[in-house]
Amino acid sequence: MRTRLAFALLGAMTLAACSGGSNSTPSTPGGSGTTTQTQSLTTQEAAQAGTEAAFDPVEQGDSENGLYNGTMGPAYMASFVALQSVADGACHNGVERTVTVISPTEKKYETKYFYDSACTELARDVVADVVNNGLGESVTRVAKNYGANGTLLSTRTTAYSITGSSGNFSKTETSSLIVGTSSSPAAQYGRTETVATSSGSNTSNVTGNSGHLTNNGNPAVDESFAHTAQLNNVTKTVDSSGNVTFAGSRAAQEYKGPFGSLTLSSSPPFTIGGASAYGTDSISGSVTFDNDGDLTNVSINATLFNGDTVAASGSGDPITVNGTVKSPTGATIATFTVDQYGDGIITYANGSQGLIIDWHVVK
């Protein structure tokens, strides 16, 4: 079941408007291209950039944990794990799952998550179309999040290309996020990975590259943010119950530019265009998902290039994720609270609030 958060601002905003830019003139960073520059961030920028940094590992894990627990096809680990809910289309404590055979080489996996245990109030609908192409799999995953009143909050479309065998494979992943009924993405990312698993182990070592940009249209900031990162010291572990844990650390090169000006390369290595690099952030921690794909644990810490810090942790069942962005002196810049699908509220130091939709600050 899904946590009910009070979306106090929904009545005053339309979701379609949240994902578009404002009419003000975009601020311009200190240069063009990707030349590294030392730039300061305003308090509002730091709050948004810090929150995005903390959420990035959770967002990535949310998109791909189904590859390892079997909810997006045969589990891509050394051993298959049993699903928490059987795929019979019936309600199992707030979850409904079905598997449809399209052809001998194609299956469609659908998982519906509900606010209530009786499966009457839809919270999330995830459909993964899995095609066996002989060398591996191609997967198209569409995840839709809904508010408690039935409003469509977001649609995330992700494509995966996988070659290799269970436990040892390569994967390229690209994704875009639409907020509400907007026609333009609020966020995009690309990620390439090589996964290596020792014989008899359920822990994989992961190396690769990722790029991520956001066009969230926050009028108070009116900029686009992005980062690139090399994946180092990253592991994925699947336990005997099918719980998936992603853990490790990385350094991310951060970028910003006028709203809507940034571009993400379409293939690896994923790079950012049209932006100025302004510093490197360090992020470490772990996130865990159960074998139904629900987020169950978060422990993330990040240090931004200017010394600002971010800490995020989760508790409860269903989980609620809370976090704080602080200045180098320890002053609170912002706090945030979201449910297990990344929907909630950010509160700034001046008392004003904004929406977070699917792990992104959108207002």
Image: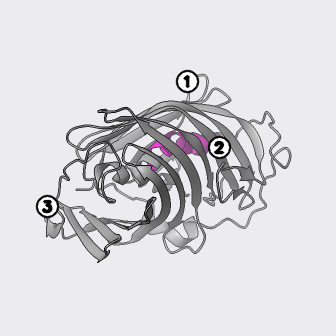
Say which amino acid is labelled 2: Thr
Label 1, label 2: how many angstroms apart (C-alpha)? 27 Å
Outermost residue on the top side: it is 329
257 with respect to 13 (left or right): right
Say whether disc 1 or disc 2 marks the residue closer to the N-terminus: 2
**Residue visible at 48% across and 66% down in the picture:** 157
Residue 72 coordinates in the image, percent (x, y): 34, 59
Viewer-closest of 129 and 127 = 129
Say which amino acid is labelled 1: Gly
**Residue visible at 20% across and 42% down in the picture:** 241
Residue 306 coordinates in the image, percent (x, y): 68, 29
Say whether disc 2 or disc 3 marks the residue closer to the N-terminus: 3
* Magenta part of the chain: 46-59
The local crowd at label 1, few if under 14, some if 14 to 19, many if 20 or more residues have their Cα within 10 Å, is: few
| Residue under label 3 | 92
**Residue 286 falls in which quadrant of the image?**
top left
| Residue under label 2 | 228
| Residue under label 1 | 330
**Residue 238 falls in which quadrant of the image?**
top left
